Image (spheres, helix red, strand yellow):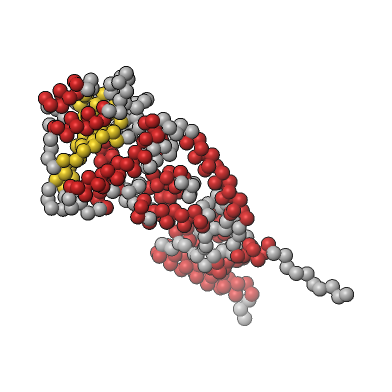
């Protein structure tokens, strides 16, 4: 007759063989709870019950190692209040009181999709939303909300270089001049000449022609010079070494206007990147969104963008001020006012979210009626 010890030893051998088979299966399949989402709360609850049962015979760290479950994830499941459940869902407002409220998210979505703001980059639009009092949130918050995406790792290693170009301390110390070529639908080309002030990023002058003409360079220089005070110092004009900038006609205009020209990356180490960046914004944020069929159409579109850029579009480098406000120094207190408004908006958001709750929190917070007392 089989003794009790023999039966226990046989059961132990069967259990050990079963555990070895299951562990071999887990290792071969590569399944690990650390890399697998379990959105259902019932699944998480069953794993927690199994861990609690196994803790009676094995240490917790050994149980978690067998399951392939990280300690941080286990304790995160264990800390979830019973009332809120274990199902994956958007966090309760009380748990994250500083997150954007629903009206703010709707306002961001509306402004991003609105046709009248399609010419504004995301960072500019975030600052503009603060100026008009709609949403007080950073551009990074906007990006996480509407442009979350995966990015491939870049293998190419670029040489280190300065990320900050030449900067001035006052308007009309340094101007940038350049020409950009735009191809129209009929195959013809439009040549856009412009002058930008380094300190304020204000577009001081621009013109559009059908051919590359040195006279256009002279025209924008003369027009930009009208912004100067007769008694003030003359600015330096930074240009590239293109034929439209280096010729006898332009040289005579510079002498007549008492302007000094320097060639980017030739006479100085800095590049003419500031106006190149503005060309990129003009084309990709506005011109390429429209039909470029005639040069008159291009002139209308460029005039609109220049007016918006100078007077209405806040620049991130100026903490919300526009180029016109920087050039004429008419809004020196605006950055402090926006910072104060952001602080008040955050306090209001905290109060709103702390006063709200999810459905389960509401059910628990309401006191259950007690037993009726007979009279």
125, 219: nearer the viewer: 219
The quarter of the rendered structure image containing the N terminus is bottom right
The quarter of the rendered structure image containing the C terminus is bottom right
Q: Residue at x 54, y 70 (%)?
A: 15
Dividing the picture into quadrants, the one containing residue 259 is top left
Q: Where does the image place residue 314, in percent across and percent down from the top left?
A: 39, 40
Q: Can residue 183 be seen in this snapshot?
A: yes
Q: Where does the image place residue 61, in percent across and percent down from the top left?
A: 56, 55
Q: Point out the residue furthest to the bottom here.
A: 1
Tell me if residue 249 comes above or below residue 213 in the rendering: above
90, 224: nearer the viewer: 224
180, 357: nearer the viewer: 180
Tell me if residue 266 comes above or below residue 45 in the rendering: above
Q: Residue at x 13, y 32 (%)?
A: 214
Q: Where does the image place residue 371, in percent across and percent down from the top left?
A: 80, 72
Q: Residue at x 57, y 56 (%)?
A: 93
Position of 239 with respect to 13 (left or right) is: left
Q: Where does the image place residue 276, in percent across and percent down from the top left?
A: 25, 37
Position of 170 with respect to 49 (left or right) is: left
Position of 71 with respect to 129 (left or right) is: right
Tell me if residue 113 comes above or below residue 10 in the rendering: above
233, 283: nearer the viewer: 233
Q: Can residue 155 be seen in this snapshot?
A: no
Q: How many marks?
A: 0
Dividing the picture into quadrants, the one containing residue 256 is top left
Q: Residue at x 61, y 51 (%)?
A: 351
């Amino acid at each position: 007759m089989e003794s009790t010890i023999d039966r226990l030893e046989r059961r132990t051998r069967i259990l050990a063989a079963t555990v070895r088979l299951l562990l071999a299966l887990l290792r071969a399949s590569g399944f690990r709870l650390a890399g697998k989402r379990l959105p259902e709360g019932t699944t998480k609850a069953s794993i927690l019950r199994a861990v609690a049962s196994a803790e009676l015979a094995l240490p917790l760290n050994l149980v978690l190692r067998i399951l392939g479950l990280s300690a941080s994830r286990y304790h995160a499941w264990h800390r979830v209040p019973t009332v809120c459940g274990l199902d994956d869902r958007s966090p309760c407002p009380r748990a994250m009181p500083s997150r954007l409220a629903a009206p703010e998210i709707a306002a961001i979505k509306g402004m991003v999709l609105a046709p009248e703001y399609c010419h504004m980059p995301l960072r500019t639009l975030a600052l503009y939303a603060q100026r008009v009092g709609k949403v007080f949130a950073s551009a990074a918050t906007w990006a996480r909300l509407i442009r979350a995406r995966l990015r491939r790792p870049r293998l190419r290693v670029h040489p280190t270089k300065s990320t900050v170009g030449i900067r001035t301390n006052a308007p009309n110390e340094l101007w940038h001049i350049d020409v950009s070529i735009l191809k129209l639908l009929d195959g013809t080309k439009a040549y856009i000449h412009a002058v930008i002030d380094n300190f304020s990023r204000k577009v001081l002058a621009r013109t559009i022609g059908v051919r590359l003409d040195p006279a256009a360079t002279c025209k924008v220089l003369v027009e930009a010079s009208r912004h100067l005070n007769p008694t003030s110092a003359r600015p330096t004009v930074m240009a590239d070494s293109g034929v439209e900038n280096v010729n006898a006609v332009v040289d005579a205009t510079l002498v007549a206007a008492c302007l000094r020209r320097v060639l980017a990356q030739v006479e100085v180490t800095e590049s003419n990147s500031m106006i190149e960046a503005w060309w990129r914004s003009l084309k990709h944020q506005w011109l390429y969104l429209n039909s470029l069929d005639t040069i008159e159409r291009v002139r209308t579109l460029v005039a609109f963008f220049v007016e918006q850029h100078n007077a209405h579009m806040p620049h991130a480098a100026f903490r919300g001020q526009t180029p016109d406000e920087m050039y004429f120094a008419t809004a020196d207190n605006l950055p402090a006012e926006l910072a104060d408004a952001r602080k008040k908006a955050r306090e209001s958001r905290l109060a709103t979210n702390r006063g709200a709750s999810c459905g389960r929190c509401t059910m628990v917070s309401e006191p259950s009626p007690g037993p009726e007392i007979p009279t």
